Amino acid sequence: MSRAPRVVTPPAYDLCVAVNYYAPYVSGLTEVAKVVAEGLAARGRSVAVVACRHDPELPLTERLNGVDVYRAPVVAKIGRGLVSPGFPGLVRKVAARSRVLHLHLPMLEAAPLTALSPVPVVSTYHIDLWLPPSPVNRAAMAVTRRSAALALRRSAAVVVNSEDQAAHSELWPVLRSTRRTAIAAPCADRRGGEPRYRETAGTHFGFLGRIVPDKGLTYLLEAFTGIDDPEARLLIGGDYTTVAGGSVIAEVRAAADRDPRIRILGLLGGREIHDFYASTDVFTLPSVAESFGIAQAEAMMCGIPSVTTDLPGGRYPVQATGHGLIVPSRDPAALRHALLEAASWGTERRTAGALRARELFGTESCLDRYAALFDDVSAGGGALLSAAHDDAGKEHAA
């Protein structure tokens, strides 16, 4: 059995990031960790990421886009969970040579990591863990929830995507008393693509994300197949081969077999994502569990309205910009009606919505706020955190 990579004397880091899954794995949580780590590294900061080696083919250590990545071997997988006995020790070793430890929650190991951390901890709480119903999953959710609660109490600062997400979290009794600040997930400006996925003059509806149960794709498929327009298309992009916890690609393929207007694009990267947005008229995120939805915010930044479900956090980008519609979750009829309504929006409305989205969700403003927060925590300051908490409270009150 392979052993955890030995860290003899790691260089001094400004920031140590701890996350279970890291690139090349793709998810919203992983993307936030990656963009913040690489963005701060590009600004001249020394950054290390400690993750579990979810794929045994990945190296134990490597340098990716200016970031030193350390991976702890995985001995087993239970659903989405990775069993890596060496992960906590590896995090502690690298964190001991860092100014700040940044945790991405939910994470089963969060409680011991904060208890043993030799440096101040900033925890980003992305979402309440959601797993498909089963006795094992219910137990995993309960243990992870408890670990997150302990970690949040011990953190020097807590980041949430929005106050809407925090105030409706099952951990709100804990979150409300933390030194927290709301920082929206970093979103890339994807304008300038080519409409390579367009096939007709009809409306092209788009989904981009992991092809997993919590994204509510079964409801989207039912909604779209009820649209009586032979020129319409549904573009479904995203990973379904390496997703943790299993995929629903079989259901998507079955629907595509019945309806030839549905296109399965698979995992998209680089300029392919720009081209996806350039080919899309209406974006949709029909999730049954969601914390923010980077893909929907990036779509809105391109002028594409988003139809999303009424979930705390996931609805925030639409609420904040007005550039989309919110429908009840698990309601194909309401989703279909909203998709058709958003398709009728004109250029002026789309342009105004795009401007608001870019102002709120651009990557640089996110990096600015994280950098200031890490600096304040590493210096033992409290003024910035208190101000951030006050600002977050005003957002919630509004």
Image (cartoon, helix red, strand yellow):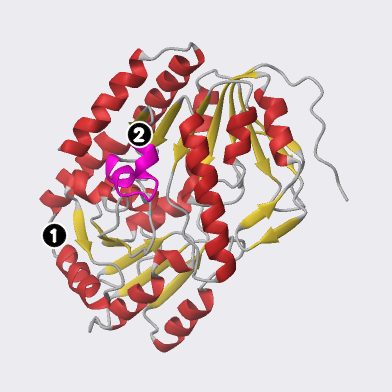
How many numbered marks, from 0 up?
2
Q: Residue at x 38, y 27 (%)?
A: 179
Which comes sooner in the sequence, label 1 or label 2? 2
Quadrant of the snapshot with the C terminus: top left
Horizontal arrangement in the rendering, residue 300 relative to residue 259 (left or right): left
> In this view, which residue lies farthest toward the right?
1
Above or below, 161 against 304 in this view is above
Secondary structure under the numbered disc 2 in the rendered image: loop
The stretch drawn in magenta includes residue 119: no
Q: Quadrant of residue 343?
A: bottom left
Q: Which x, y percent locates residue 356?
A: 20, 39
**Residue range (magenta):** 163-177
Residue at label 1? 345
Q: Residue at x 40, y 83 (%)?
A: 260
Q: Residue at x 54, y 69 (%)?
A: 247
Residue at label 2? 183
How many C-alpha atoms fall within 10 Å of the one at disc 1: few (<14), some, or many (≥20)?
A: some
Q: Which x, y percent locates residue 64?
A: 64, 35
